[in-house]
Image (tube, grey):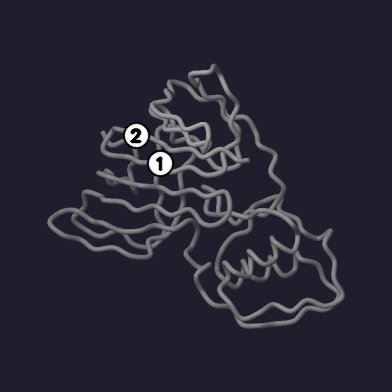
Amino acid sequence: MAALPLNPLPVLVATITAPRVGVWVADVEVAAETAPTGRVALTPETGAPWSGTVIAGGLHAGTWRGRVVGGAGGLRAELPATSYRAGTLHDVLADAVREAGETLSAGVDLSAWAFALYMRLQRTAARTVADVARDAGLPWRVIRSGAVWVGAETWPAVALADVSVVGEDTRERRYELAGGVLGIDPGVAVTLPLESGPTAVRVDSAVHRVEGDEVTTTVWGAS
């Protein structure tokens, strides 16, 4: 059984790149007779599903190779320039996310950042979200559910079971992990069994690699 089915086709190979700022991307190879399209879910044995949208791919000899991006895929769309008066950064963010056909994560609230005048430039929705997050001094990303999140990091602790460290570079804060690692997300804190002893690491980004039922994850710790 594949460790990471897609809708529920067995994933042969996958690389999921999850940054602390930006959109997660999954490059996958799936055993399929019909190419998956539209909204899909990658469902690990541990951790919540990744909900994203197919933006590219091709089918050959029973194998589909393609790319899935977090959310509805609308953050690549270009938004027109517009101006705001006597509003808040939440107004700008909510409009950009809605116009892109995306969903704003529950609990996101930038209404404390008020302005007299704000000019939204003509650019992609992703750039607009990044602009708003920068103006608020906050990180942003698309989370597993596919929603757009902007907020202060709280670094919630995530307990890991049956995880081993197969390589570490403490100077670069990079750790190669194996086992039950698909529950690791950017913005969480995990305790890793390093050579020097159990060590709490705040996850800045993670790259999950799946090949059949073999799973490894590279984690970069936040500074």
Residue contact between numbered discs 1 and 2, judged by CB atoms under 8 Å: yes
Tell me the quadrant of the picture where the N terminus can be found. Answer: top left
What amino acid type is highlighted by mark number 1? His
> Is residue 17 positioned above or below 181 on the image?
below
Residue 16: percent from the left, percent from the top? Answer: 41, 47
Q: Which mark is residue 41?
A: none
The extreme left residue here reads 61
Q: Quadrant of residue 35?
A: bottom left
Q: Amino acid at mark 2?
A: Val
> Which residue is rendered at x = 27% and y = 43% of the image?
10
Q: Residues within 10 Å of mark 1 (few under 14, many from 20)?
A: many
Q: Give the residue displayed 56% in from the left and 70% down from the top.
A: 100
The residue labelled by disc 2 is 215
Q: Position of residue 212 (x, y in %)?
A: 26, 37
What x and y, as percent, mark residue 148?
A: 60, 57
Which residue lies under the disc numbered 1? Answer: 208
Q: Residues within 10 Å of mark 2 (few under 14, many from 20)?
A: some
- Residue 74 located left or right of residue 37: right
